[in-house]
């Protein structure tokens, strides 16, 4: 048989039966929210559901006498605070957009939030970014944490995943995480500011976890990704959540404490902020930018120079196709530059950002290959390359009947 080694080559190993199967480690998804994905599997998904059906669904949920109603997945909706109030003003109702950066809520939610006109549109009940994080802190994010993990784990294992870099500490403490050894989870501790990072450090979070997550901006769909120039169909550049001073303190802290920093940045303006700070600090450890959805040539050169890893989502090419032209206009050609990044030898991780997308590494590998990226690069970067950060031993295997570097077929999952 042929076994993929850490150098990215298949090495022949003589066995009793000398079969011609090809062995690789299980797949790593380097960015998802595994508990959020489990919630998506447990609850109705609002994607492509008409508003009247969403309202009917909320009314049905209300008959179960829940403490709160949280539903996820809409992309476009005319539902607002008033329509939700007509259903109930007594329990919190929260409808989270598929991007996870915008939600529509009723008055019961708004009355408990701090006054914040930057992130809350009170007339419509639309909340964004930091206000949504406050919602999770005050009302909770999950309906059933243990069942959410169970559902997500079953799905991921069945698809050949063994390793996950996840982001789940929103409205819960580390003691509530239900993880086991069936999946190896590399948890990222999301923080809203430097003081919050210090609080987590003082609570010994980083004895267990070795990664920090910051959200520099939002999403294209919610028009909260921060751009160099105004949105083609909007009045501003989006939302910049962090400033240079705070980010500098976080990077310096991560460098001093040997922590891996993951920086969510979708817009080119947000990536400018990151690169300006990185140029000043010149970090020695490997850190990553998650998404990097729109990139200019000068940014690609600087990302390579400072050895930043880009954590990117192939399926976004398909999912965002319908909005990129309206959001960005002529700038849309600067999005999702996988092939150019490969050609420039910029290191890449590949992930799903579930529950935004359903994890499907096979789909992603085929998509990347159609862009001109070789299968050997794709398979290696979905298996061994994330060890650079997570340090997990790759002990479980996928078994391919033919060389996946030549022709990709779905493998068996081995022990």
Image (cartoon, grey):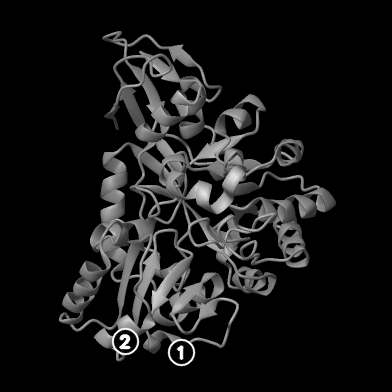
Would you call the spot at circle 2 few (<14 residues within 10 Å), some (14-19), or many (20 or more)? Answer: some
Q: In which quarter of the view is residue 343 placed?
A: top right
Q: Which of labels 2 and 1 is toward the front?
A: 2
Measure the C-alpha gap from mark 2 to mark 1.
15 Å
Which of the pair 153/224 is nearer the observer? Answer: 224
Residue 229: % across, % down = 69, 55
305 versus 102 height, above or below: above
404 versus 132 height, above or below: above
Is 13 displayed left or right of 8 in the figure?
Answer: left
Mark 2: secondary structure: helix
Which quadrant is the C terminus positioned in? top left
Which of the pair 199/377 is nearer the observer? Answer: 377
Residue, disc 1 = 112
Is 249 displayed left or right of 392 in the figure?
Answer: right
Q: Which mark is residue 269?
A: none
Mark 1: secondary structure: loop
Q: In which quarter of the view is residue 45 placed?
A: bottom left
Residue 52: % across, % down = 23, 70
Q: In which quarter of the view is residue 48 placed?
A: bottom left
- Residue at the far right in the pictured view: 280
Residue 358: % across, % down = 34, 47
Contact (Cβ within 8 Å) of mark 2 with mark 1: no
Question: Closer to the N terminus: mark 2 or mark 1?
Answer: 2
Q: Which mark is residue 85?
A: 2
63 versus 379 height, above or below: below
Residue 312 visible in the snapshot: yes
Residue 26: % across, % down = 38, 34
182 versus 300 height, above or below: below
Is 95 displayed left or right of 172 in the figure?
Answer: left
């Amino acid at each position: 048989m042929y076994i993929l080694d850490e150098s990215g080559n298949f090495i022949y190993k003589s066995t009793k039966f000398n079969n011609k199967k090809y062995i690789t480690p299980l797949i790593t998804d380097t960015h998802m929210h595994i508990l959020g994905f489990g919630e998506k599997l447990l609850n109705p998904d609002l994607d492509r559901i008409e508003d009247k059906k969403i309202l009917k669904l909320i009314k049905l949920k209300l008959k179960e006498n829940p403490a709160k109603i949280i539903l996820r997945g809409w992309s476009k909706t005319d539902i607002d605070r008033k329509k939700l109030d007509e259903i109930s003003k007594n329990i919190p109702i929260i409808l989270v957009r598929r991007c996870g950066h915008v939600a529509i809520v009723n008055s019961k939610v708004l009355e408990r939030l701090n006054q914040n006109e930057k992130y809350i549109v009170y007339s419509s009940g639309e909340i964004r970014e930091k206000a949504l994080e406050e919602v999770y802190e005050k009302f909770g994010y999950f309906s059933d944490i243990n069942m959410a993990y169970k559902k997500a784990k079953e799905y991921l294992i069945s698809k050949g995943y063994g390793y996950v870099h996840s982001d789940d500490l929103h409205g819960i403490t580390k003691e509530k995480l239900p993880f086991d050894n069936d999946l190896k989870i590399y948890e990222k501790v999301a923080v809203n500011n430097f003081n919050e990072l210090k609080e987590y450090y003082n609570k010994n979070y980083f004895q267990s976890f070795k990664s920090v997550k910051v959200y520099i901006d939002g999403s294209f769909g919610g028009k909260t990704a921060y751009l160099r120039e105004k949105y083609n169909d909007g009045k501003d550049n989006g939302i910049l959540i962090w400033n240079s001073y705070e980010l500098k303190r976080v990077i310096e802290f991560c460098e001093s404490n040997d922590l891996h920093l993951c920086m969510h940045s979708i817009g080119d303006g947000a990536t400018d902020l990151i690169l300006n700070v990185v140029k000043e600090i010149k970090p020695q450890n490997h850190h990553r930018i998650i998404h990097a959805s729109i990139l200019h040539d000068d940014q690609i050169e600087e990302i390579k120079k400072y050895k930043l890893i880009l954590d990117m989502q192939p399926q976004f090419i398909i999912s965002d196709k319908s909005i990129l032209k309206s959001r960005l206009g002529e700038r849309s050609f600067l999005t999702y530059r996988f092939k150019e990044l490969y050609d420039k030898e910029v290191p890449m991780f590949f992930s799903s950002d579930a529950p935004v997308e359903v994890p499907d590494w096979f789909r992603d590998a085929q998509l990347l290959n159609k862009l001109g990226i070789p299968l050997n690069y794709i398979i290696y970067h979905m298996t061994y390359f994330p060890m650079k950060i997570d340090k997990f031993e790759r002990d479980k295997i996928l078994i391919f009947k033919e060389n996946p570097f030549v022709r990709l077929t779905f493998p068996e999952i081995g022990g």
